[in-house]
Image: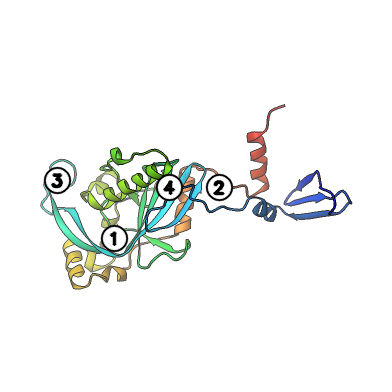
Amino acid sequence: MSGTADRITIEGHRVSTTSPEGLTVSIDLGEFLEAAFPRRMDSCGVVHPHGTALSYTEGPTTVWVHETPPWIYRFRWIAADSPVPFGPGARYRDVRIALPYFVTLAVFEGTLLSEANECFFRNGPIVSEDDPLHYPALLNCSRFEPPDGHPLSWICTQKLDRSTIAGSGPNRLMRSGFRALMHCLLETAFNDSSDHHEASSWYTESRSVDRRISTVERWQEATERDPLFALEVPWLATGKTIHEVVERIFRNHRSGPRRVTSFADLVRVIFNNACRA
């Protein structure tokens, strides 16, 4: 084509243009948008923490999908004879229990860690965003009823120390926010707060799936016999993949579309950005 077309026409789901020589070509709108605005892979200078398998951004919201391999953890767990189920006066004991792969979804608004982070279990490593997720049998991960508008497996962050989230620039803010979240999830006390303030904890919901985790004492015994037994437990299924849970998070946060993908999206862009006559 020796000249350059000066007009692009969009009619329904077809995009067309005509060369100065009179040659008209057209393409499907979706194919046009995919070619014109390809999805980018860019961390924007933020170094993802080791173990981060996937990262998504939509509007102002970013989700890091982090995987921790199977391990034996020492937790402070609410004692059976604790005078109160949570809060001041609660009594704790140290337990050593094996966990399978667990997947943490750290949710950021801009560069700041949000209050809507989630955690899940898996019996194998992440190999695709279409991998299914299972609910975590942990006292500090909460179930909501109804679940609409809420995280599926909310990490209780009452004891998250936000004073440790500091630094100039996205890299330091996001990485320190992630460290604070993981400390809160794994290194603060596990109590029955979720069973009183939310619908229940996912440990309470999961106790019947396998006798070996029905009590924390049995969980410890099973861990001593076989540290990898947790990879055999039929953890409660969410019925959703990693990508579906991330998309659900974006809907809950009203993050807006990631990119233009339809005629209606183009119309909205025009109306939102054009100067009024």
On the image, numbered disc 2 is attached to which residue? 258
Q: Tag 2's secondary structure?
A: loop
The reply to whether residue 86 is in sight is yes
First in sequence: mark 2 or mark 3? 3
The image quarter containing residue 132 is bottom left
Task: Assess disc 1: are there few (<14), some (14-19) or many (≥20) residues with their C-alpha within 10 Å of its C-alpha.
Answer: some
Image-based side of 264 in relation to 240, left or right: right
On the image, numbered disc 4 is attached to which residue? 148
On the image, numbered disc 3 is attached to which residue? 90
First in sequence: mark 1 or mark 3? 3
Estimate the spatial distance between the alpha carbons at disc 3 and disc 4, rounded to whole Å. 32 Å
First in sequence: mark 4 or mark 2? 4
- Residue 93: mark: none
Q: Tag 3's secondary structure?
A: loop
Q: If the image is split into quadrants, where does the C terminus sit?
A: top right
- Residue 206: mark: 1
- Residue 265 x/y as whole percent: 64, 44
Which amino acid, mark 1?
A: Ser
Q: Tag 4's secondary structure?
A: loop
Tell me the mark number nearer the camera, choosing from 2 and 3.
Answer: 2
